Image (cartoon, helix red, strand yellow):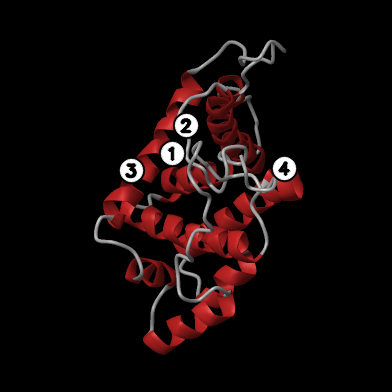
């Protein structure tokens, strides 16, 4: 509250609200890419260069929370709270394979099941990672988890991809908005898709220019 309807900020009663300082000295992708080229850095290395010593452990906890939300959501059933009697769909979607299912249909079904799992955990008041928001929290973990299972990426590679995704999300937050109160739920999910695209491209070994284009 008290933020002019921007959304996404937590303000405690009787405490002043201050605009948070920028996380990184460069606030555009162009300027970050220039630094990365000059110093021969990947985007995730740029991120780590500006974070604290406990950042790797924090990112590991983020990834564990994402995977836990997927696991809980896939095991869950029943209806969502709120009185509308909306059935949870993740478990049924995940188990909904059929004989002769094409590979592309299966891929879409499984990734969507992962995303549903996290989103339904959010709707149930359970723990999710804001990526970039609670409402859009299913997209990034779904894509990362699917590629880890499919291609065997180790956690260290996933964490680098998540750091890249976070950088993209922060750039959008800084220069535009991730707030549904400002840009609608399409804006939230659009940012999540950009973050997931950047993260996937990082996994594939993309350059900063390729990651920017993907996002």
Residue at mark 3: 61
Q: Is residue 117 left or right of residue 163?
A: right
Residue 70 is marked as: 2
Q: Residue furthest left?
A: 53
Q: Residues within 10 Å of mark 1 (few under 14, many from 20)?
A: many
Discs 2, 1 touching: Cβ within 8 Å: yes
Give x and y (percent) for residue 102. Answer: 66, 38
Q: CA distance from mark 2 to mark 1?
A: 6 Å
- Residue 188 shows in this picture: yes
Sequence-wise, the earlier of marks 2 and 3 is 3
Along the viewing direction, whichever of 18 and 49 lies nearer the viewer: 18
Residue at mark 4: 185
Give x and y (percent) for residue 31. Answer: 54, 81
Sequence-wise, the earlier of marks 4 and 3 is 3
Give x and y (percent) for residue 126. Answer: 48, 25
Give x and y (percent) for residue 204. Answer: 48, 63
């Amino acid at each position: 509250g008290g933020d002019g309807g921007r959304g996404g900020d937590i303000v405690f009663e009787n405490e002043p609200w201050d605009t948070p300082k920028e996380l990184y000295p460069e606030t555009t992708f162009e300027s970050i890419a220039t630094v990365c080229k000059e110093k021969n850095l990947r985007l995730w290395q740029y991120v780590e260069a500006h974070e604290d010593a406990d950042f790797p452990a924090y990112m590991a906890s983020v990834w564990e929370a994402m995977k836990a939300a997927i696991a809980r959501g896939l095991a869950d059933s029943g209806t969502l709270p709120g009185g509308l009697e909306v059935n949870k769909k993740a478990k049924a979607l995940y188990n909904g394979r059929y004989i002769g299912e094409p590979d592309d249909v299966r891929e879409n079904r499984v990734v969507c099941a992962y995303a549903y799992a996290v989103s339904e955990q959010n709707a149930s008041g359970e723990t999710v990672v804001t990526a970039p928001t609670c409402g859009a929290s299913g997209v990034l973990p779904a894509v990362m988890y699917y590629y880890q299972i499919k291609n065997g990426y180790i956690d260290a590679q996933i964490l680098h991809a998540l750091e890249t995704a976070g950088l993209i999300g922060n750039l959008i937050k800084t220069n535009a908005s991730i707030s549904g109160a400002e840009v609608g739920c399409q804006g939230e999910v659009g940012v999540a898709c950009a973050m997931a695209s950047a993260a996937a491209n990082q996994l594939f070994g993309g350059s900063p220019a390729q990651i920017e284009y993907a996002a």
